[in-house]
Image (cartoon, grey):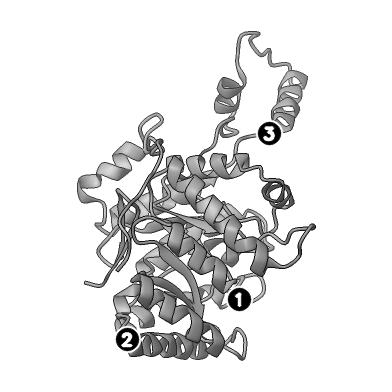
Amino acid sequence: MVKTVVESKTKTAILGFDQPFCVIGERINPTGRKKLAAELEAGDFSTVEKDALAQVLAGADILDINAGVVYNSNPNPNETEPPLMTAIVNLVQGLVDVPLCIDSSVPEALEAGLQAAEGRPLLNSVTGEEDRLEFVLPLVKKYNVPVVAISNDDTGISEDPDVRFAVAKKIVERAADFGIPAHDIVVDPLVMPIGAMATAGQQVFTLVRRLREELGVNTTCGASNISFGLPNRHGINNAFLPMAMGAGMTSAIMNPVALPISQTKISEKKAEVEAAGIIIPADMDDETFVTVFGMGSTKPRAGKEMEAIRAANLLTNNDPHGGAWINFNKPNGGSADGGRGGRRGGRRRG
């Protein structure tokens, strides 16, 4: 069976057809997060720390690290992103012990992350574009790491799944020219929004099967892309992920955390309850209140997508004896200790 091995200093995550689905936490990414971007420019890493710990507690197997901030003080990411990537990687692996995914469109930032990361990180990413192939594949070989291969090239992203498969095949073949084995290529077949393309789900399932059967590679995707622009996105994601797993997908870049219920929503619900004539005990705290009324939690916790993945692992016999499912459904179950403690040194890639 094809296995893609990703390592931190102390832990190993394996992507494989006979392995539990691998969750790559996406939260450490300032894209579209103005508050986080401003914090990072100011040297404030408090949100990064919270996101790292919360994602591991929710069950992330790997953490994606993206330092793509365009500073107001210096709009050149080629200068600002490499040192920021190094700082974030060092910070995160001092907090948690899961493997990392180094994610950047800036070549120098990719190498900075590889130099700082302990163990064997996943590199994100290479595409079928010639300049990207010529820079990234030598890095993959030099540091002996696996890489995410995104199925677009110099012509852009094709809506034709056969074209996207051909791009993936091209990347796998070019990687082989560098001595990089297929098991170190994790193909992202590119999930299109179902709201814009009715066949998007069917395309992905077909592509994943072909990638598994014809190229023998593991796969990943940006899971939430499928539901972009639609209501109840979690409902769509919860259906999509097990179906993709059934087709052979072995990982996803996603948010494993259900965010806490805001104080505003709690106050609104309390007002609604009181207006209905229901008396709220004076000693009832907010966590008890939101639990009683089925609102969620005041604390970060594993999201519904994680529940769907755990169930699918059980149903595909990738959860021996159902241990992970049983643990996940215990009170406060499925949590990790967050791997607290500093990280120094570590195995380097040869």
Q: Which residue is mark 3?
A: 262
Counting from the top left corner in percent of width and height, residue 220 is at: 44, 68
Mark nearer the N terminus (1 vs 3): 1
The answer to whether the residues at label 1 and label 2 have Cβ atoms under 8 Å apart is no
Q: Residues within 10 Å of mark 3 (few under 14, many from 20)?
A: few
Nearest to the observer: residue 14 or residue 47: 47
Q: Is residue 149 above or below residue 268?
A: below
Three-letter code for the amino acid on which mark 3 is drawn? Ser
Q: Residue at x 55, y 87 (%)?
A: 131
Q: Which residue is mark 1?
A: 198
Q: Is 27 on the left-hand or right-hand side of 148?
A: right
Q: Secondary structure at mark 2?
A: helix
Counting from the top left corner in percent of width and height, residue 60 is at: 43, 49
Mark nearer the N terminus (1 vs 2): 1
Q: Residue at x 51, y 86 (%)?
A: 128
Three-letter code for the amino acid on which mark 1 is drawn? Ala
- Give the farthest residue toward the top: 282
Mark nearer the N terminus (3 vs 2): 2
Counting from the top left corner in percent of width and height, residue 29 is at: 60, 56
Q: Residues within 10 Å of mark 1 (few under 14, many from 20)?
A: few
Marker count (numbered)? 3
Q: Residue at x 62, y 91 (%)?
A: 155
Three-letter code for the amino acid on which mark 2 is drawn? Glu
- Tell us which disc is closer to us: 1 or 2: 2
Q: Is residue 112 above or below residue 188?
A: above
Quadrant in which the C terminus is drawn: bottom left
Q: Which residue is mark 2?
A: 214
- Tell us which disc is closer to us: 1 or 3: 3
Q: Residues within 10 Å of mark 2 (few under 14, many from 20)?
A: few
